[in-house]
Image: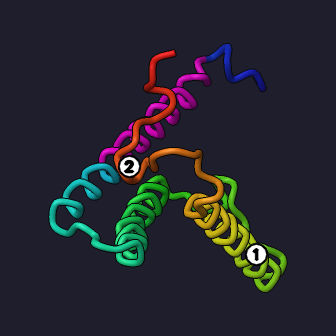
Amino acid sequence: MGNNQADGGDVIPSLRRLRYLIDIVVLAAAVVGLERVLSAIYVPTSLQSGVVFDVLVKIPSVMIAWLLIRLHHETLSDIGLKRPRSWWRACLIGLGVALLAYAAAYISESCRMDDRLLPAGPSFREGGSSPRSQSV
C-alpha cells in the first residue's frame, strides 16, 4: 500500500514538474519581454543610471517569480529559502560580498586604465589592431 509508483502515484509528480516547467518558461518570457520593452523606452547614458535602470527592471521580475510561487499555494520555504537565524548577520554578509564585488570591479578597472599594463605600440583605444588579428 505504501508504494505509490505501482498504483500510478508517479503521475502527480510529473504533472507538478510540468507546471514548474511552464512557470519557468513564463518567468523567462516575462523577464526578457520586460527588459526589451523597458530598454526601448529608456536607454541609460551613464554607468550610474544603467545600474539604477537594471535594478528597477529586476524588481518586477522578482515580483512575477513571487506571484508564480504563490499561485502554487507555496511559500518561499517550500522552494528552499528560510529565515536567517540573525538578520544582522545576513545583512552584514550581503554587505561584505557587495563590497568585495565593487572592490574587485574597481581594481579591475584601474588596472585596465593604467597605461603601464597595456602592451607597447598603438593603443587599442586609438584604433590600433589587436595582437590576435595580426598574421604571424
Place of residue 20 in the rendered image (x, y in percent of width and height, measured from the top left) = 48, 40
Residues drawn in magenta = 8-29
Q: Residue 83: tell me if it is visible.
A: no
Residue at mark 1? 96
> Any magenta on residue 22?
yes
- Judge by depth and name the residue closer to the eye, 54 or 50: 50
Place of residue 33 in the rendered image (x, y in percent of width and height, measured from the top left) = 25, 51
Q: Earlier in the sequence, mark 1 or mark 2?
A: 2
Which residue occupies 51% across, 44% down?
121
Residue type at numbered disc 1: Gly
Q: Residue 69: tell me if it is visible.
A: yes
> Any magenta on residue 18?
yes
Secondary element at image label 2: helix
Which residue occupies 67% across, 18% down?
5
- Quadrant of residue 106 within the rendered picture: bottom right
Q: Would residue 122 appear left or right of 78 to someone viewing this image?
A: left
Q: In the rendered view, tell whether residue 103 sits above or below residue 17.
A: below
Place of residue 7 in the rendered image (x, y in percent of width and height, measured from the top left) = 63, 17
Place of residue 134 in the rendered image (x, y in percent of width and height, measured from the top left) = 45, 24
Q: Would residue 85 appear left or right of 70 to someone viewing this image?
A: right
Q: CA distance from mark 1 to mark 2?
A: 30 Å
Q: Would residue 89 appear left or right of 123 to someone viewing this image?
A: right
Residue at mark 2? 27
